[in-house]
Amino acid sequence: MTATWADVARKDVEDAARSRLLWGLVAVFVAFVTMALLSAEQLFPDPVTVDAATALAGVAMLAQLFVPGIALVAGYVSVVGERRSGSLRVLLSYPFSRSDVVAGKLVGRGLVTGIALGVGFAAASVLVAALYGAPDPAAFAGFVAAGALVGLTFTGLAVGGSAAAPTRGRARTLTIGSFVGMVFFWKPAVVGLYYAVTGSLPGLRAEPWYFLLKRLNPLEAYRVLAGAALDRRVSEVPNLPLEDVPATVTATPERLDIAARLAGEVPLYLADWFSAVVLLGWAAVPVVAGYRRFERADLE
């Protein structure tokens, strides 16, 4: 009998469908997209004329929290759940290696997340066209690609954490805790480091390394990609006003563009496309680290 990671992935998707996890995620994401688009005008602090791109920027603003949440829920028990139930030892009694298990779980949970996002984005295309007019096809494709990429990123984080953790509680701490840190503590830490090095808060102009550290946060990288695709600024949630930037400037998003905040040319690592590299790195590194720990773990 020849068994590969593809068999693990197929079984994982089938199990998710039978347990209604897949259909629950689809329903929740479609409901999220619907509510976000119906309330798009209320997502912006100032009265704006909401067109298709602006409405999608509002969806992206909320999706930076919602899409990672879907991926983490789908993936954080993927390996450790089978490990604690004892079914992992049964699975490994067949000709599967531990690398097959991790790779199969990554692909399987990625497909579960991808199906949920795909159905949700299909619903978004219909709703946007009905409510705000047909979006630009290239802009909408970029918006969907950014959402799919951040979904893959957090699927990798979830599966890697699940492979590394000996218990469900530890997996939850590694994955959900990392996400909370990205949302609430990453920017304060970077701003604090900037103040410690320069003696001042980052203002409208700041050093390139400051923006690099900010963009190493996958949520910031997602905002950059989605904003570039839609040609709209995607705001962070929560919006922590830690930078020394006047309110008159924050009201004009074009002045917050990276090119306007640097004294010289924009370095390669601050180009919009580099944010995709950041997201792919976050998708891969936790999986590799989790696998290495899983490979050495005693499953008894």
Image: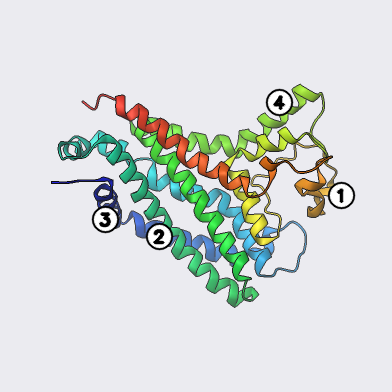
Of residues 264 and 163, the one drawn nearer to the viewer in this rendering: 264
- Where is residue 56 shown, x and y percent of the image? 62, 63
Q: CA distance from mark 4 to mark 1?
A: 26 Å
Q: Where 72 falls versus 44 (above or below)?
A: above
Horizontal side of 75 relative to 259 (left or right) equals: left
Give the residue number, with chain letter if any, for mark 4: 193
- Judged from the image, the secondary structure of the residue bearing numbered disc 4 is helix
Give the residue number, with chain letter if any, for mark 1: 248
Residue type indicated by callout 1:
Thr
Residue type indicated by callout 3:
Glu
- Judged from the image, the secondary structure of the residue bearing numbered disc 3 is helix
Query: Farthest residue toward the left?
Result: 1
The reply to whether callout 4 and callout 1 are in contact (CB within 8 Å) is no
Q: Earlier in the sequence, mark 3 or mark 1?
A: 3
Frontmost of labels 3 and 1 is: 3
Residue type indicated by callout 2:
Ile
- Where is residue 118 shown, x and y percent of the image? 45, 62
- Where is residue 216 shown, x and y percent of the image? 61, 38
Give the residue number, with chain letter if any, for mark 2: 115
Q: Where 223 falls versus 190 (above or below)?
A: below
